[in-house]
Image (cartoon, rainbow, N blue to C red):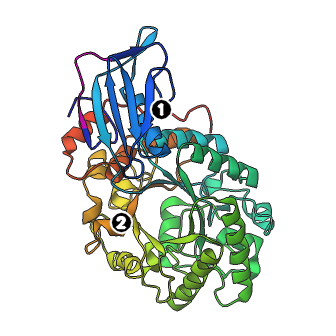
Amino acid sequence: MTDAALLPRPLVTRVAGTAPWRGVAAPEPGAHGVVVTRHPGAAESYRLRVDESGIEISAADDAGVFYAGRTLAQLATRDGEGWVVPAIEVEDAPRFRHRGFMLDVARHFFPVEVVTALIDRLSDLKLNVLHLHLSDDQGWRLAMATRPLLTERASATAALGDAGGFYTADDYRTIVAHATSRHMTVVPEIDMPGHTHAVSLAYPGIACDPVLSPHIDEVVAAYGGGAPTRDEPYTGFAVGFSSLRTDLEETYDFVRDVVRELAALTPGPYLHLGGDEALGTDRADFDRFVARAARLVIEAGKIPVTWHEAGTTPDLPEGTVGQYWGFRTPIEGMDEKARGFVRRGGRVILSPADAIYLDMKPDGDEPLGLTWADGPTSLERSYDWDPAEVVPGLAEEDILGVEAAMWTETVRSAADIDRLIWPRLASAAEKAWSPRGIDAADFHARVARIAWRPLGGVS
């Protein structure tokens, strides 16, 4: 191992010679002096060799070439008018296929230029999935030709009473195209049957009245925003009060329209239908709805993804992917729900909230963020876990990957994203890409030497 500050840490690095490479132009695949070849190997894998005579990249596929370029960019430094790269050999491949980041654009909306700038930063760390949470109680964020009232009536506001917004179909295509250019898959999420107060503003006939509870009262007392009211936009932080009508055929007509249109806009294989915190939905109704909605996703040609609550739904289609958002040590049977997906031939994405929910405060003095995931989440805690040890009974091959998340109740701007995302995003990236067993001190030494490129300049 050399002393290169690489994130995420590669499988193998070693010194390749005594003299570095020097050049006038920035070193990148395709540039003068950088030779690119192909070799058989695991998807996204690459080998990189640098010495004074030149730079050689050998990769299994285009993604591998791209990630070799990201490693090269971390190694390169300015040297007067030129560039220098240390003599090094790297052999590298990802641990998991799915290496993601979820951005909630429903609680607070972020324009295309923020999302595309974020994609660039994520790809620097070899993340390859952008999960967009496009709907919630506070707003609907994607124009649908089949259901135009969603953005006409349910997109103008956001959490904390801020202005909302939405993406046109062309905006969404721009995001997808930019992600594709960075070898990143976009996974869109429409959260159902709960988290649907915004839907009720547009199509009230398929939505239930808000279900109030002592929990809702506690959230309102702590954060303000008032209790949810039918026919009025909701700008608070409470969850679990809204539900679609699972007994109406019109509800499934709505789901079919939205799923088909979203699938047609999305080239990637997955479509996320939510399924979390449906506290206002009877469990039997929830099971019936989620199973049928997942089948509609399959009919639209996509693989359904749900949050872990759906893992014990009896008729959940085979191959549905589950996303676990419990703690590093599971509570309240969340691990059993996660295992349910594997029993039905699916796999699990790990997003332990007390490690890589990046909207959690990093410390008690931070003004942004929340603390419900077992208090503030320090950089040390965000790294102190291993994907194979979170859910007992899941083998390595049962884990599709790792995904960090940023919910945006308190996150109102690109600067707020910058403030909360780094350096804890590096923990998620390394858990998703690098081999297990890396010493935490090694990680902290490397992360201290790499700076986050602020999203800045946009809001």
- Image-quadrant location for residue 349: bottom left
- Image-quadrant location for residue 456: top right
Magenta: main secondary structure equals loop
| Position in image of residue 356 (x %, y %) | 38, 54
Can residue 339 be seen in this snapshot? yes
Q: Which mark is residue 7?
A: none
- Image-quadrant location for residue 263: bottom right
| Position in image of residue 32 (x %, y %) | 49, 20
Q: Is residue 28 left or right of residue 16?
A: right
Of pointers 1 and 2, the one earlier in the residue sequence: 2
Q: How many marks?
A: 2
User: Considering the image in quadrants, where does the N terminus appear?
Assistant: top left
User: Considering the image in quadrants, where does the C terminus appear?
Assistant: top right
Identity of the residue drawn at 38% across and 77% down: 342
| Position in image of residue 270 (x %, y %) | 55, 65
Q: Is residue 126 above or below residue 156?
A: above
| Position in image of residue 375 (x %, y %) | 33, 57
Label 1 sits on residue: 453
Q: Is residue 189 above or below residue 84?
A: below
Q: Amino acid at mark 1?
A: Arg
Label 2 sits on residue: 399
Q: Amino acid at mark 2?
A: Ile
Q: Which residues are magenta?
A: 13-20
Q: Nearer the viewer, residue 116 or 420?
A: 116
Q: CA distance from mark 1 to mark 2?
A: 30 Å
Dot 1 falls on a residue whose secondary structure is: loop
Q: Nearer the viewer, residue 375 or 109?
A: 109
